[in-house]
Image (spheres, rainbow, N blue to C red):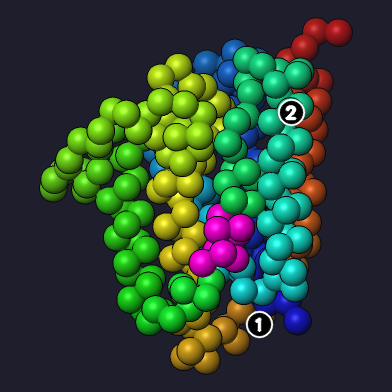
Amino acid sequence: MRYRLLDEIRGATLVSMLLYHACWDLVHIFQVKAPWYESRGAFYWQQSICWTFIFLSGFCWHLSKNQLKHALTIFLGGAVITGVTLLFAPEAKVVFGILTFLGSASFIVILLNNILKYLNPPAGFFLSMLLFGLTYPAGAGVIGIPGLFSAPLPRFLYRNLFTTYLGFRSPGFFSTDYFPVIPWLFMYIAGYYLYLWMKERDQLKIFDRSLCPPLGFLGRHSFLIYMIHQPLLYGLLALFFIDF
């Protein structure tokens, strides 16, 4: 069975992502002036999309019929996007993007599942969220909680593509969509533990309802939509902004 509400949450997040990426295209490709796009509010909008997708993916890891096949499909989707952008739009290349991360996170949880499942789910959830908060600023060279405390990380960590993939961005690295293993794996694992926690308390049935079936349709086809959304968005926007 599918939990219909989970599909609808994913679908709603997908719509939010499509709107955000349409704004990105308008600002960065079609040169539309939109100062608000660089505001703190726009950053929070972008982060809400990332957090929801990644957390929900970790939550739904348990629901996949074949976790290895799912991980491989998502990872290869990320590789396709990287290859296409490197060939046709190097100025907007995607290296270590969201699909590469989600595939990697699923592989990692497959490897660690026999260890992770023995930790008490509430403890695992709160520990994962704490580690996410502590490592969130790792890309800037520190760990800690902004405004409370921080500690610098050794500079030798930030040296090549592999360390960049892990979360320690090397000098000069550029990607328009960058989701490294650290800190985002901890958000993914928090979702993994929330599923176990809710299952333990027999609360998963709250997702067996439907509030908006069209969003559920989008959620069930989110991978395909993600793979094709940017060319479609560009084509639609070009109708208005390119003088043929």
Q: Residue at x 41, y 43 (%)?
A: 44
**Magenta span covers which residues?**
105-112
Spot occupied by residue 167 in the image (x, y as percentages of width and height): 43, 39
Give the residue type that dot 2 points to. Gly
| Relative to 26, 199 lies left or right | left
Residue behind mark 1: 208
Give the residue type that dot 1 points to. Asp
Q: Which element carries disc 1, helix, strand or loop?
A: loop
The C terminus: image quadrant: top right
Q: Label the magenta part by its dominant secondary structure.
A: helix
Q: Which residue is most to the left?
A: 148
Quarter residue 9 falls in: bottom right
Q: Nearer the viewer, mark 1 or mark 2?
A: 2
- Is 106 magenta? The answer is yes
Q: Residue at x 60, y 87 (%)?
A: 205
- Is 29 magenta? The answer is no
- Whether residue 23 is situated above or below residue 144 in the rendered picture: above
Q: Which residue is most to the right?
A: 244
Front-most of residues 30 and 75: 75
- Whether residue 57 is situated above or below residue 146 in the rendered picture: below
The N terminus: image quadrant: bottom right
Spot occupied by residue 73 in the image (x, y as percentages of width and height): 76, 52
Q: Residue at x 47, y 64 (%)?
A: 189
Q: Name the mark on residue 83.
A: 2
